[in-house]
Image (cartoon, grey):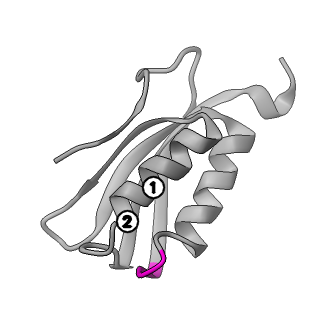
């Protein structure tokens, strides 16, 4: 397996104007476009959180997207990523919006 193909899992939380701006929908679409699996949800704290899983190169691309792009009407102040680990297989079969 090439280095960029190593499977990883990482948790994330995005801070800023990220609720009420279709952030979850755009996150799901970008994750699916990259072939990632995981989930995204709003929090009671006004942030968006979730988990990404897939090849490390694609996960890195998605992390950059979450830090700098988001949905068109969002304003991202910061992005936290933690609990990153190498995994042997994916825990999810799709990228879900959790209500």
Q: Position of residue 34 (x, y in %)?
A: 63, 42
Residue most extreme to the left: 44
Mark 2, Cα crowd under 10 Å, few <14 / some 14-19 / many 20+, is many
For the record, the magenta segment spans: 72-77
- Classify residue 98 by image quadrant: top left
User: Label 2 vs label 1: CA separation?
Assistant: 6 Å
67, above or below 11, in the image: below
Of the numbered discs in the image, which one, if any, rests on residue 27? 1
Q: Secondary structure at mark 1?
A: helix
46, above or below 13, in the image: below
Residue that numbered label 2 is attached to: 23
Q: Position of residue 12 (x, y in %)?
A: 43, 55
20 relative to 56 in the view: left or right: left
Q: Position of residue 88 (x, y in %)?
A: 59, 15
Mark 1, Cα crowd under 10 Å, few <14 / some 14-19 / many 20+, is many
Residue found 41% across the figure and 79% down from its top? 74
Residue found 53% across the figure and 40% down from its top? 32
């Amino acid at each position: 397996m090439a280095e960029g193909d190593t499977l990883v899992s990482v948790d994330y939380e995005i801070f800023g104007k990220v609720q009420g701006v279709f952030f979850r929908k755009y996150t799901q679409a970008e994750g699916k476009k990259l072939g990632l699996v995981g989930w995204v949800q709003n929090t009671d704290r006004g942030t968006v959180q979730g988990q990404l899983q897939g090849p490390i190169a694609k996960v890195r691309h998605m992390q950059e997207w979450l830090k700098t792009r988001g949905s068109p009407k969002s304003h991202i102040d910061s992005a936290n990523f933690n609990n990153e680990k190498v995994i042997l297989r994916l825990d999810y079969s799709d990228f879900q919006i959790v209500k």
